[in-house]
Image (tube, rainbow, N blue to C red):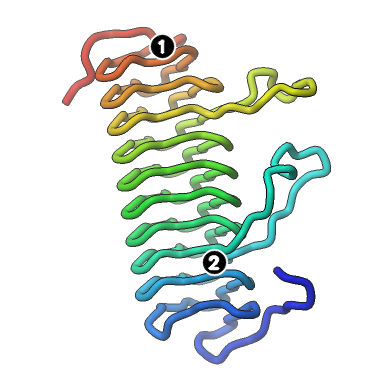
Amino acid sequence: MPPGAELRPSGRAPGLLLGEGVELPGDVELGGNVVVHAGTRVGAGARLQDGCVVGKPVALGSRSSAAGEGPSGETVIGAGSTVGAGAVVVAGATIGERCVVADQAHVRERTTIGDECVVGRGVSVENDVSVGARVRMQTGAYVTAWSVVEDDVFIAPGVVLTNDPTAGRRTGGQELRGATLRRGCRIGGGAVLLPGVEVGAEAFVAAGAVVSRDVAPGVLVMGVPAREAGEAPS
């Protein structure tokens, strides 16, 4: 929120609070107790459901590596998209058109989500993530910072992407690298992807697999650690 800006009550819905200069078309559907911070642009026909927070100012720990990644910019909710009850979209995130950010989901700063995506209930999408179009991220998935998810990817419930090979003991100059999920790949329930791995286009990672190295396009991998087990099912 810019210096001097404040949230102000609005008569458009019970408990609605709006920051300065919010772009909120008249056909936006508003639930109760919605908070929209300054620097937010909401597209026509969007739905902001009960208790969601859009454009929330960034809050970082004193040692966070995200602190030096530059300003967050405006927050965008695309036309026809839904932000569910209790969901939080942090300042600087961009949600495309006709998306669903489901109840209690969390999308962080400088993350871009393409059109017609589903961010399922309780999903966490961290900062500086790029998500293509028509991606489905199911309940409880965790997409770590600096990941790339291309078009038409499916991420099942409980999937975890990681980005720190030292588990919190990086020294100066070591970078965080999330996974890269190429077009149309599918990640089964509860799978874990280690930092920097790439899953090729149309590949399939079986449920519960631990992916420690790159997965070739069009193959099925399974196990701990994940190993090739044939062609990906259609």
> Which tag, 2 or 1, sits closer to the chain's start?
2
> Residue 132 or 141: which is nearer the viewer?
132
Residue 80 location, quadrant:
bottom left
Residue 138 percent coordinates (x, y): 39, 43
Instruction: Tell me, yes or no, whether the two marked residues, 2 and 1, touch with CB atoms within 8 Å.
Output: no
**Residue receiving disc 1:** 226
Q: Residues within 10 Å of mark 2 (few under 14, many from 20)?
A: many
Label 1 environment density (alpha carbons within 10 Å; few <14, some 14–19, many ≥20): many
Q: Which mark is residue 134?
A: none
Residue sticking out furthest to the right:
62
Q: Who's the residue at 30% across and 47% down the image?
A: 134
- The x, y position of residue 182, in whole percent, is 35, 29
How many angstroms separate mark 2 from mark 1 (CA)?
38 Å
- Percent of width and height locating residue 156: 37, 35
Instruction: Name the amino acid, label 2.
Output: Cys
Circle 2 residue: 52
Per the image, label 2 sits on a secondary structure element best described as loop
The quarter of the picture where residue 11 lies is bottom right
Q: Is residue 142 left or right of residue 65?
A: left
* Amino acid, disc 1: Ala
Measuring from the top left, give residue 230's x and y in whole percent.
23, 9
Q: Quadrant of the image for the C terminus?
A: top left
Determine the secondary structure under disc 1. loop
